[in-house]
Amino acid sequence: MELTADLQSRLKRCRSLVVLTGAGVSAESGIPTFRGAGGLWKQYRPQDLATPEAFSRSPEVVWEWYDMRRSLIAAARPNPAHQALVDLEALFPSFLLITQNIDGLHRRAGTQALLEIHGNIWKARCTVCAHVFDELRNPLPFPELPRCSLCGQLARPHVVWFGESYDAQIIERAEDSLSHCELLLVCGTSGMVSMPVFLTRMARDRGALVLECNLETSEISSLADFSFSGPAGETLPQLVQFFRE
Ligand code: BJW
Ligand code: ZN
C-alpha cells in the first residue's frame, strides 16, 4: 500500500466504516460482472432481461436467465475479498455493508450488517400482492413459472431492474449510515448505475474519507481519497492487515 503517512493516521482514527460493493467483488468467485470483458451485458441486452417491460413481454425468458445465473452462483464460493469484509466488520465498532450484488455471497461469507439494495437472486416477489418469498433453491421446473406462495399469482425475481425505483426504506438506511460514517470503502463497482456515485458523493460531502478498490479506473475514482488498483481478493486482505497493525 502506498498511502501517505497523513492518510494512514487519518484512517487509523476511523471508528465507523461503510462498504459499498459491486460485481467486481464476486468476480474472483467466478461470477461474471456486467460491463467490461466477459461481462453479462456483452452477451445479453439489458432491455431484454432486466426491465419490467421485458418481464411483461416474456417472463419465461427472464426467469430462464435468472435460473442460469442461480446455477452459476450455487456452484460458487465466497472468495478472499468477501472474507476480508467479514474481518473488517469485526474491526470497526460501527459497520455496514451495502451491496449491489444479488448473489448472496456476502451473507454466505458471514457478513452480518448487510443491505442488498438490488435484491437477492434467491428470492421471488409476487407481481400482484408483492409478497416476498425464498423458495428458489432448486432449478425451476420449466415451463412452469414460480407462483406466489400466498395468492398463486405470477412471481418475479426479487431484484431492482432498470427503470425501477429502489426500496425507499433500504435507501434511507443506507443514507443514514453514510451520513454518519467516517470511512467509505467502495469495491468492485463501475458506478455506471447512478446509486453508488450518489451515495459516495453524499458520504464525501458529509466529511467521510473515501477509499476505492478496483481493477480499473471507475466513476468512483475521482471522488476517492485513494484508489487501490488490483483484484479485490488481494487488496482487501492487505487493507485488513493495515487496520490490524
Ligand atoms: C474488479 C474485479 C476484481 C472486476 N477486483 N474490481 C427511470 C427510468 C429509466 C431509467 C432510470 C430511471 N431512474 C434512473 C434511471 C437510470 C438507471 C441507470 O443508472 N442507468 C445507467 C445504466 C445509465 N438507473 C436505474 O434504473 C435504477 N433506478 C433508479 O435510479 O431509480 C431512481 C431512484 C433512486 C433512488 C431512490 C428511488 C428511486 C435501477 C438500476 C438497477 C440496476 N440493476 C442491475 C440488474 C438487476 C440485478 C441483477 O440482475 O443482477 O444491477 S444492472 C447491473 O448493474 C446490476 C448491478 O448491481 C449494477 C451495477 O453494476 P456493478 O456492480 O458496478 O458491475 P459492473 O460490471 O458495472 O462493474 C464491475 C466493476 O468491478 C468494474 O469497475 C471492474 O473494473 C471491477 N472489477 N473484477 C476489483 N477482481
Ligand atoms: Zn401474491
Image (cartoon, rainbow, N blue to C red):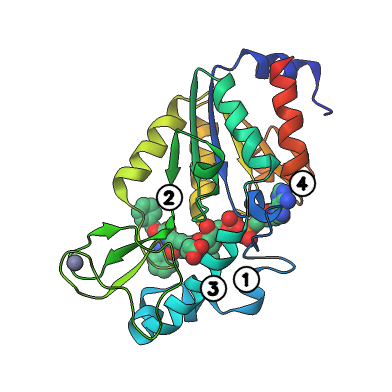
Q: Position of residue 135 (x, y in %)?
A: 34, 61
Question: Is ligand 1 less than 8 Å from the beta carbon at label 4?
Answer: yes
Q: Position of residue 5 (x, y in %)?
A: 80, 16
- Closer to the N terminus: mark 2 or mark 1? 1
Secondary structure beneath dot 1 equals helix
Secondary structure beneath dot 4 equals loop
Q: Position of residue 207 (x, y in %)?
A: 54, 25
Q: Which residue is mark 4?
A: 231
Which residue sits furthest left? 151
Looking at the image, which residue is at 64% across and 48% down?
Answer: 25
Question: Is ligand 1 less than 8 Å from the beta carbon at label 3?
Answer: no
Q: Type of residue at label 2?
A: Ile
Q: Type of residue at label 1?
A: Leu
Residue 193 makes an appearance in the image: no
Q: Type of residue at label 3?
A: Met
Q: How busy is the neighbourhood of tag 1: few (under 14 within 10 Å), some, or many (20 plus)?
A: some
Label 4 to label 1: alpha-carbon separation: 19 Å
Looking at the image, which residue is at 55% across and 41% down?
Answer: 20
Q: How busy is the neighbourhood of tag 2: few (under 14 within 10 Å), some, or many (20 plus)?
A: many
Q: How busy is the neighbourhood of tag 3: few (under 14 within 10 Å), some, or many (20 plus)?
A: few
Q: Which residue is mark 1?
A: 40
Q: Type of residue at label 4?
A: Pro
Q: Is residue 165 above or below residue 174?
A: below
Q: Position of residue 211 (x, y in %)?
A: 66, 34
* Displayed quadrant of residue 161: bottom left
Q: Is residue 141 above or below residue 184?
A: below
Where is the N terminus found, in terms of image quarters?
top right
Q: Which residue is mark 2?
A: 117
Q: Which residue is mark 3?
A: 68
- 34 left or right of 154? right
